[in-house]
Image (cartoon, rainbow, N blue to C red):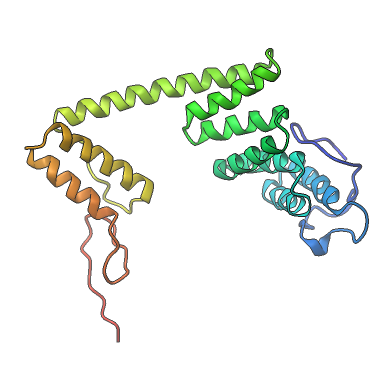
Amino acid sequence: MSQSPGLEQCCTGCLRGQPLQALCKPHALPPSGSVSCSANDRGMELFAAGHASAAFDCFTEAVRLRPTSAVYHANRAAAALKLGRADLAVEAAAAAAKRDSGYLRAHLRLGRALLALAQPADAEAAFKQVLELEPRNAAAARGVEEAARLAGQQRVQHGEDAAAAAAGSRPALSRGAVGEEDAVAQLLSAEQMLAANPRLQASRTGCAETAALMLPCPCGISTPPGLPHQQVTQP
């Protein structure tokens, strides 16, 4: 079995030669031997073949069967990163680091996932943990630099937002559907402008409009901002 870059196997390829389409569900695994190890090895095969989603399922199964393995959690984090699911990668990498605090790849993947979630302070802490264990680790050093750049960009953006709030201006509200996180960000921006300009009518209007984005419709229907809402009566 070919070794996937960054992944780790726990035993020889128990499932070597089986078709890639076989997903890692309990019924697809051999009835004897180390089943969790087989799931992990199968995940590595799938990951190397570019089947990140199926590999993630295999690593998840391996974790379910043997939750104490830092390797399984770390491999699951790698698959989650490949799928663009940084939230799941943080969960898996943190679980790996918790089970083995000296596991460099766990801390590295945690740092990468936290960067993807725009959390530079926590990402920097993860990368620095690697440097404490291995001071010459190049990937961790690059991660610290990336985290510092992201933190700087966020400070600039926050400064621009504060200046705009002080001037009594704010970005226009979205005309489409707004997610909960975006709505919260818009509300905080509007509240910041209101705090800086308590007598400005636009500040009060901004807070009211943005807060409305977060309120559910009485009839249970979500209407994108800017579009008329039609009350629906039950037959």
Left or right: 142 as drawn, with respect to 45: left
Instruction: Identify which residue is drawn at 79% across, 58% down.
Output: 22
Left or right: 33 as drawn, with respect to 104: right
Residue 194's spot in the image, x, y percent?
A: 16, 38
Instruction: Identify which residue is drawn at 49% across, 36% down.
Output: 117
Q: How many marks can you see?
A: 0
Residue 95's spot in the image, x, y percent?
A: 66, 41
Instruction: Identify which residue is drawn at 72% across, 27% down.
Output: 102
Quadrant assignment, res 127: top right
Quadrant assignment, res 70: top right
* Rendered view: 166 above or below 29: above
* Rendered view: 8 above or below 132: below
Residue that protrudes farthest toward the bottom in the picture: 235
Residue 5's spot in the image, x, y percent?
A: 76, 32
Residue 50's spot in the image, x, y percent?
A: 71, 43
Left or right: 140 as drawn, with respect to 185: right
In the foreground, 59 or 177: 59
| The C terminus, quarter of image | bottom left
Quadrant assignment, res 99: top right
| The N terminus, quarter of image | top right
* Rendered view: 69 above or below 153: below
Left or right: 191 as drawn, with respect to 197: right
Instruction: Identify which residue is drawn at 24% across, 45% down.
Output: 173
